[in-house]
Amino acid sequence: MSAISAFAATLEAKGLEAARTALLDNPVNIAVFGPNSDVTIHGHIAPLLRQRPDLGVLLLMDTLDINGLRDAMRAGVREVLPGHTDTEDLQQAIARLTDVVDPLPAHPVTAAAPPPRPAAQQRDNGRLVMVCSAKGGTGVSTVAINLAAALADMGRSVTLCDADPVFGDLPLLLGMKTRPELEPGELPKKLLVEEALEDLVTHEQTGVDLFTMYRARMPLNDLPKDLVFAVFGALQVASDIAIVDMPAPLVNVAEYLTSADEVFFVAGTDVASLKNLRLARQLMDTAGMPIERAWVVLNRVRNYADFDRSHYTQIIGLPVVCGIPDSPALIAASDGADVLTRSNPKDAAARAFAKFAQDLAGRFDQMDAGLAT
């Protein structure tokens, strides 16, 4: 049974156990239950979604009431419609599901050990990823944290670096201790490459290794550039993927982006953010950075069901790799020093991060396979 992109697999009441087995064993991504069936939310759908959280479920209910709707949403049902829904409305609902479910990664049916690293991935250095923005306040740190956690969930070893000595807040967002504050002149003396790997601290919830600069009233662009490049290189050796949370504004750190395997610009969908991204695109040309290594992550996307990446790609002039839905759960997790992909993996934003990580790891695996041949 192949993955469904435009329509759904409709399962009747007959053979519920066979239907459940089919959904667990086959790459189906959308299922419609009901109406007039013996399927129950608590007895059938909820257990199924615990094993297949990537599955998009549309439930046709004979009787719509507030309690049934609440139970369906809590179980992870994506769409609920009355049992008498006509074909056109059903197809529209499935189309909405397709927009959300198609980008989601497949989850293993049962818990398994982290996947082994492919032979082609045995490199002297890991991959270096930089997350940045044309201006502050776009959610760069939130994106970097959740991307790192999602990659760690896939079995990749990940190092996360807070590269902002002035305003860096990764330790705060992760509920970890910050480094002591230094006088500006002391920072270059303390930032020793040979000690960078010894200064890694593992975040217990995610297993991600964190490296933070000492706090100082000295921006990253005032540090000796050869020292900063050397630190980034040392962190790249420490893991499969090193993710660097770069400070804003972009104009001050553009030179460092040229050393990254991939760069992700984080922005909102408002006019001001899109305008700034176009300016960033021009800056990339000036810095001599290859465009094929640059991507855009649109954060806090409203009306996510109608989100069209190609539309924004044309506006910005850079490919939009994903959109992160506007999620109250994501804001609450950041405020509570929590990581959404771990605390609420069924949230739409968490699922978007999971897909983001899956795509990134897949690209790197392809690159490494090419190097090995």
Image (spheres, grey):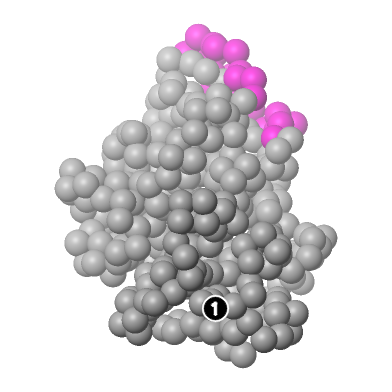
Q: Which residue is mark 1?
A: 36
Against 61, residue 129 (above or below) is above
Seen from the viewer's position, the closer of residues 251 and 357 is 357
Against 26, residue 171 (above or below) is above
Against 136, residue 371 (above or below) is below
Query: Mark 1 is on which residue type?
Result: Asn
In reply to whether residue 178 is colored magenta, the answer given is yes
> In this picture, which residue range is highlighted in magenta?
176-203
Q: Residue furthest front?
A: 63
Quick check: 292 left or right of 275? right
In reply to whether residue 64 is colored magenta, the answer given is no
Q: Position of residue 29 (x, y in %)?
A: 55, 76
Can residue 67 be seen at all in this image of the molecule? yes
Quick check: 74 left or right of 267? right
Seen from the viewer's position, the closer of residues 328 and 190 is 328
Q: Residue furthest right?
A: 113
Asked where in the image residue 15 lies, by quadrant, the reply is bottom right
Instruction: Name the residue located 56 percent from the left edge and 43 percent from the top edge.
Output: 340
Can residue 193 be seen at all in this image of the molecule? no
Of the 4 image quadrants, the one containing the N terminus is: bottom right
Instruction: Name the residue located 67 percent from the left edge and 86 percent from the top edge.
Output: 14
Instruction: Name the residue located 18 percent from the left edge and 43 percent from the top edge.
Output: 272
Against 40, residue 145 (above or below) is above
Seen from the viewer's position, the closer of residues 323 and 221 is 323
Asked where in the image residue 327 lies, by quadrant, the reply is top left
Seen from the viewer's position, the closer of residues 179 and 197 is 179
Asked where in the image residue 37 lies, by quadrant, the reply is bottom right
